[in-house]
Amino acid sequence: MRSPLPRPHPLLLILLAIGVLLGQGTALVVYIGTLVLHESSHVAAARSLGLRIGRIELYPFGGQADIPDLELAGPLVEILVALAGPLANLMAVAAAALLLRYGLATPARGDLLLNVNLAMLAVNLLPAYPLDGGRIFHAVRSRAIGWTPAGREALLLGRLIAFLIAIAGIVGQLAGYPGWQAVVLSGVILWAQRGIERQTPLSRWALWLRALGALSRGEVLPLQAFAAASGSELRQVLRRLFGGRAHRVYVYEGGRVVGALDDQALYDAAQEGDLHRTVGEILNREARDRGGHRGSP
């Protein structure tokens, strides 16, 4: 399946227009190439790991690809996808150094390629969600406390870092240095976080629970159920729930139905963070908590 074409953020278009007016043609070509290289590496890594790619938006200091199943795929996959962009920039830095070392590029162009990729690498490794460093922080913390609390921590840390970057930029600008770039970066981080909050699995669950609330008020919604083997992992079931209107999962084992789980039980299990737990294990735990046998359909 072909990935969607990236869409430039309006702020990126404004900065590009300023660059054109200032006659920075060569720098713009290197900058855009670096930006596309970085984001394409994320997309390639995600697709190679079997993840679907949604909307791709390019910001001045990186991009944001909507990968619906990324968090559900587990912390290791999230780390691998996050590292793909910085690794591509690191390889470009090495290539630029070799071109300069052997005189295959003019010093001006070689330095430009080197510096742009170094800047992209350094910025994206900041632990400010949703930059790559922030995603790595989120993945590591999710192993310890679950993806929902880790997401809250990552967003708070990202906002703190964005605030500090903005302060540093303002102080630098007042001191005669080009601190406006840091202020722009701070704004980009905060803007991107708004989009991330709308895309997280927790937000999707909140929308779904709101729909269940509509049911309790007597409204009519087309709800469905589906079946899953007892060995199916929670992350697989959640993908199916997010993609449709199902609200109940029948658990099969040995060719027969051994119980059923509603979306609240799955939501509670997901909150605990172990998305590799099987629905059979969740069903057994539900039965133990009730002090009886497995739930009936």
Image (cartoon, rainbow, N blue to C red):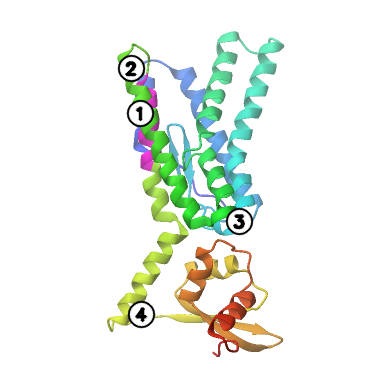
Image quarter of the N terminus: bottom right
Measure the C-alpha gap from mark 3 to mark 1.
32 Å
Q: Is residue 116 visible?
A: yes
Is there a contact, CB below 8 Å, between mark 4 and mark 2?
no
Measure the C-alpha gap from mark 4 to mark 2.
55 Å
Q: For numbered disc 2, what is the local secondary structure?
A: helix
- Mark 1 vs mark 4, foreground winner is 1
- Mark 4 vs mark 3, foreground winner is 3
Tell me if 173 is positioned left or right of 255 in this view.
left
For label 4, the crowd category at 10 Å Cα-Cα, with few meaning under 14, some 14 to 19 and many 20 or more, is few
Residue under pointer 4: 221
> In terms of image quadrants, where is residue 20?
top left
Percent position (x, y) of residue 285? 59, 77
Is there a contact, CB below 8 Å, between mark 3 and mark 2?
no
Percent position (x, y) of residue 119? 52, 24
Q: Using the image, tell me which numbered label, if any, was put on residue 173.
A: 2
